[in-house]
């Protein structure tokens, strides 16, 4: 990020802003109108080089004023005044520069490749930086009407300004702008502009004229948004060494306008989600220990449950785990940044047991070991959970307690406590909440049900009851909201990575199917509470009253089992434990390995909840009815891992790579050109390997290619052992199938390497290199041969798309395969993850030869085909001797 060495101060205290406003007011301009313009363009606090920015903006606004690009009724009344002010500021730049704090107002570049705003907060003030530029062929604005290329670029800049002002008019308040002094662009409206405005600056060069020749920025909104979403650019018109960058620039620009389109349709811009959401109540914590491994990788795992329920085995001491990693630099933080779950490589070392408890713990340890072996087998019934008949008994006890209160009982106080206990238990049962979480339920009043769509970006850490009032003052309950869970990350994503990832939700809105929401709302009014808490009762008192209600039903009826009714039903119907964690917002599970690799859309979460709740309610004899039908959007957000690469962006990368690898080459090629081609071809091959196998990008991810070579280089698919989780301490491998498409690509790559070595005279280095370095080789431009590494993978992504973690493929494929209907245990086997709800087990529930795996392989094939992926021969046969 380019950030000024001096802190970016608040515009409110900026001498430059103050003196410019005073000067403008002195010649008759309304200072509030000028302040609005500065807010909407996100003007730099020091107004660096803004003389030319204002000159250009005057011309952009003149086009917007005609209505040619769309209607801007909300702020159209100011356009004429803004144009007049901008032209005055540009015409009087020399005089304004003499005012205190405005010495850089007319700052000029130091050479023809310089930009006066570089190093002055470019990412925070990206739009004004891009609006400073003019097309290379047009030294003045507006461009000559006959200069088609300059006009195209001019209209593209105008659309950037139009969309930016439109979004900031809605979402960037004047008070916030004038008092903000952070380093990052805030608020994000319509999208993070840093990468997109870098694209605009680059496209001002004539080099890109043919690349953009089929874009139509003269179209009005929203037709222009549709046009640029479909636009791919003429990559063949560019030199090979900048084709990848051009595709990257275009992708960034399309992401920006996708956000603008969403704002145009009335959607609120999505805020970047940093960290892991905070507030985890997980039972696992990292503590340094004096063990001869990295202290950062030591974990003490305590009991998963802290409950009085006798059916949940008491934990025997503490299990100590170490992080074996896969390389010298695999610290938990670095693994997290690369896209891996930090807990994925933990291995058990020993268990800490109190000496006094040791003898009686031996038998429990034996049974615990047997239980772990059995955990790989999934049963629909478990002694730890309430059976179907028990659920009926529980439901009728709850309903009877609620009905008793409505029948004017003799002892109103006792009946009231039974009512509270019944409502809490009902909430726990149908929403899968613990007693502690249920007690935190609060009411949220909204104007109408249409507002519910906006709550996916809220950050409440407690459950919510949504309610509204009709015109007659009648209170109506609408549904419930639960906090979305995600892992507790120790690192943060870059702002640009948020734009590459699928939209993330921080809150889940669910409908009511059993009238519970209205019952809770009626209770809230009867209690005449003066705050937003539904239940005003002490935790100890609540536990006593719940015990009084459940006691007569038998010892198996405990709050712990009640809270497991909903998640157990979800696992029963989907087989996906991570989906149960997400739907029921089970906070203690947020740091499970699967959560680092999984996204579930809000649409899927709601559908799963409705299906599970319907099954439970029909079982107990209740006819479910939806309280409200929630609106569904095209690009709905999802819950889970913080980074899952968008499918369309990966497809764009692959499409661009194929275009660059299959174009015809010039007759004479430089060595640098050949090295660049080799990078693209290796990147294409590795992406195919990573997506089709789920391999972890460890220090040298070449194992499968090595096995293929040892197998004689077949064209057909074959089975192989993949040891990407192996370390110096433990042997670990899983069986994977190398698809026929990947085997063919390996063959193509082998031919490519042989021809490459014959052309660039590096056979001596090749033969002296270590065997593992010969497999997937990287030519570093200095005629050195090195092995493919995670760092190299991330460098390639930066060139072709942006900052994508090297291990993006695991979250990408788990999410994709689950969305395509592949059974969760098959996906877990594919990615070598322990299944069921146990923390870590030694066995998988399915074999890769299982008949169901054929469905998984078909889905994997479809994913590759949808990505427009196929084996690709290198184009060296077109090359003359070098």
Image (cartoon, grey):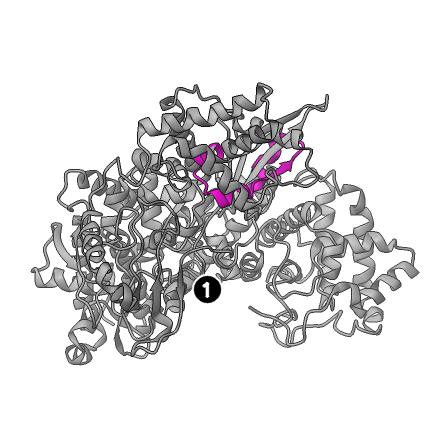
Quadrant assignment for the C terminus: bottom left
Determine whether 442 is above or below 246 in the image: above
Question: Which residue was labeled with disc 1?
Answer: 490
**Corner quadrant of residue 430:** top left
Determine whether 119 is above or below 571 in the image: below
Residue occupying the far front of the picture: 410
Can you see residue 870? no
Q: Residue at x 50, y 51 (%)?
A: 212
Image location (x, y in percent) of residue 522: 62, 27
Extent of the magenta region: 426-455
Q: Nearer the viewer, residue 685 or 659?
A: 685
Q: Nearer the viewer, residue 757 or 689?
A: 689
Image location (x, y in percent) of residue 857: 21, 43
**Corner quadrant of residue 617:** top left
Can you see residue 587? yes
Image location (x, y in percent) of residue 276: 48, 57
Apparent side of residue 135 relative to residue 318 in the rendered image (left or right): right
Q: Main secondary structure of the magenta part?
A: helix
Apparent side of residue 260 relative to residue 300 in the rendered image (left or right): right
Image location (x, y in percent) of residue 794: 38, 65
Q: Residue at x 79, y 51 (%)?
A: 82
Apparent side of residue 92 relative to residue 552 in the rendered image (left or right): right
Q: At numbered mark 1, what does the secondary structure look like: helix, strand or loop?
A: loop
**Corner quadrant of residue 855:** top left
Q: Nearer the viewer, residue 500 or 632?
A: 632
Whether the magenta-drawn stretch holds residue 162 is answered as no
Whether the magenta-drawn stretch holds residue 439 is answered as yes
Apparent side of residue 491 relative to residue 318 in the rendered image (left or right): right
Q: Residue at x 74, y 47 (%)?
A: 62
């Amino acid at each position: 990020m380019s950030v000024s060495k001096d802190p970016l101060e608040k515009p409110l205290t900026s001498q430059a802003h103050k003196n410019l406003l005073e000067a403008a007011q002195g010649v008759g301009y309304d200072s509030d109108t000028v302040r609005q313009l500065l807010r909407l363009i996100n003007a730099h606090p020091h107004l660096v080089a803004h003389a030319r920015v204002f000159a250009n903006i005057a011309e952009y606004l003149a086009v917007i004023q005609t209505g040619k690009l769309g209607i801007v009724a909300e702020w159209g009344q100011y356009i004429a005044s803004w144009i007049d002010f901008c032209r005055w500021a540009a015409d009087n730049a020399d005089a304004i520069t003499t005012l205190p704090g405005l010495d850089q107002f007319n700052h000029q570049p130091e050479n023809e490749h310089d930009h006066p705003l570089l190093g002055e907060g470019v990412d925070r003030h990206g739009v004004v930086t891009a609006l400073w530029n003019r097309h290379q062929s047009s030294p003045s604005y507006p461009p000559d009407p006959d200069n088609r290329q300059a006009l195209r670029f001019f209209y593209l800049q105008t659309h950037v300004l139009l969309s930016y002002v439109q979004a900031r008019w809605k979402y960037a308040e004047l008070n916030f702008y004038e008092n903000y002094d952070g380093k990052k662009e805030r608020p994000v409206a319509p999208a993070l502009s840093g990468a997109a405005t870098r694209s605009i600056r680059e496209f001002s060069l004539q080099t890109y004229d043919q690349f953009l020749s089929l874009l139509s920025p003269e179209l009005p909104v929203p037709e222009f948004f549709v046009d640029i979403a479909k636009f791919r650019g003429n990559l063949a018109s560019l030199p090979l060494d900048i084709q990848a960058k051009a595709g990257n620039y275009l992708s960034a620009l399309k992401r920006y306008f996708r956000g603008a389109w969403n704002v145009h349709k009335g959607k609120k811009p999505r805020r970047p989600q940093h960290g892991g959401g905070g507030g985890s109540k997980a039972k696992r914590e990292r503590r340094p220990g004096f063990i001869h491994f990295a202290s950062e990788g030591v974990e003490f795992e305590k009991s998963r449950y802290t409950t009085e329920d006798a059916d949940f085995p008491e934990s025997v001491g503490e299990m100590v785990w170490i992080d074996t990693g896969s390389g010298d630099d695999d610290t938990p933080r670095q693994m997290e940044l690369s896209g891996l779950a930090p807990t994925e490589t933990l291995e058990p070392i020993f268990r800490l047991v109190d000496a006094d408890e040791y003898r009686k713990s031996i038998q429990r340890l034996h049974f615990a070991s047997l239980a772990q072996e059995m955990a790989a087998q999934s049963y629909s019934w478990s002694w730890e959970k309430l059976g179907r008949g028990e659920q009926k008994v529980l439901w009728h006890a709850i309903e009877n307690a609620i009905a008793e209160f409505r029948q004017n009982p003799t002892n109103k106080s006792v009946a009231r406590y039974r009512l509270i206990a019944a409502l809490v238990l009902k909430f726990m049962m149908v929403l899968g909440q613990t007693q502690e979480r249920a007690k935190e339920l609060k009411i949220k009043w909204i104007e109408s049900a249409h507002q519910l769509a906006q709550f996916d970006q809220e950050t409440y850490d407690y459950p919510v009851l949504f309610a509204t009032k009709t015109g007659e003052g009648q209170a109506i309950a609408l549904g419930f909201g639960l906090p979305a869970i995600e892992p507790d990350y120790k690192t943060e994503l870059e702002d640009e990575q948020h734009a590459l990832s699928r939209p993330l939700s921080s809150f889940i809105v669910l409908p009511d199917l059993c009238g519970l929401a209205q019952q809770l709302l009626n209770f809230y009014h009867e209690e005449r509470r003066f705050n937003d808490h539904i239940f005003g009762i002490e935790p100890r008192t609540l536990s006593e009253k719940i015990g009084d209600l459940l006691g007569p039903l038998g010892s198996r009826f405990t709050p712990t089992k009640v809270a497991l009714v909903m998640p157990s039903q979800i696992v029963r119907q989907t087989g996906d434990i991570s989906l149960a964690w997400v739907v029921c917002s089970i906070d203690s599970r947020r740091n499970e390995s699967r959560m680092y690799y999984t996204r579930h859309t809000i649409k899927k979460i709601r559908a799963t909840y409705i299906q599970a709740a319907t099954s439970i309610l029909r079982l107990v004899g209740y006819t479910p009815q939806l309280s409200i039908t929630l609106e569904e959007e095209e690009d709905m957000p999802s819950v889970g891992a913080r980074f899952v690469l968008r499918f369309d962006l990966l497809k764009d990368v692959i499409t661009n790579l194929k275009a660059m690898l299959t174009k015809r080459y010039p007759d004479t090629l430089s060595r640098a050109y050949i090295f660049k081609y080799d990078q693209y071809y290796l990147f294409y091959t590795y992406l195919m390997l990573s997506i089709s196998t789920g391999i972890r990008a460890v220090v040298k991810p070449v194992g499968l290619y090595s096995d293929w070579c040892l197998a004689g280089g077949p064209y057909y698919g074959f089975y192989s052992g993949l040891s990407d989780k192996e370390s110096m301490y433990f042997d670990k491998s899983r069986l994977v199938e190398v698809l026929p498409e990947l085997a063919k690509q390996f063959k193509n790559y082998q031919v490519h390497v042989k021809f490459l070595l014959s052309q660039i005279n590096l056979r001596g280095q090749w033969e002296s290199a270590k065997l593992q370095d010969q497999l997937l080789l990287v030519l570093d431009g200095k005629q050195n041969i090195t092995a493919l590494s995670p760092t190299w993978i991330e460098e390639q992504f930066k060139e072709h798309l942006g900052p994508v973690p090297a291990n993006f493929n695991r979250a990408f494929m788990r999410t994709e395969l689950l969305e395509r209907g592949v059974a969760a245990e098959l996906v877990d086997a594919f990615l070598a993850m322990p299944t069921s709800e146990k923390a870590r087990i030694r066995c998988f529930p399915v074999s890769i030869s299982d008949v169901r795996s054929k469905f998984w392989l078909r889905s994997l094939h479809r994913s590759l085909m949808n990505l427009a992926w196929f084996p690709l021969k290198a184009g060296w046969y077109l090359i003359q001797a070098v």
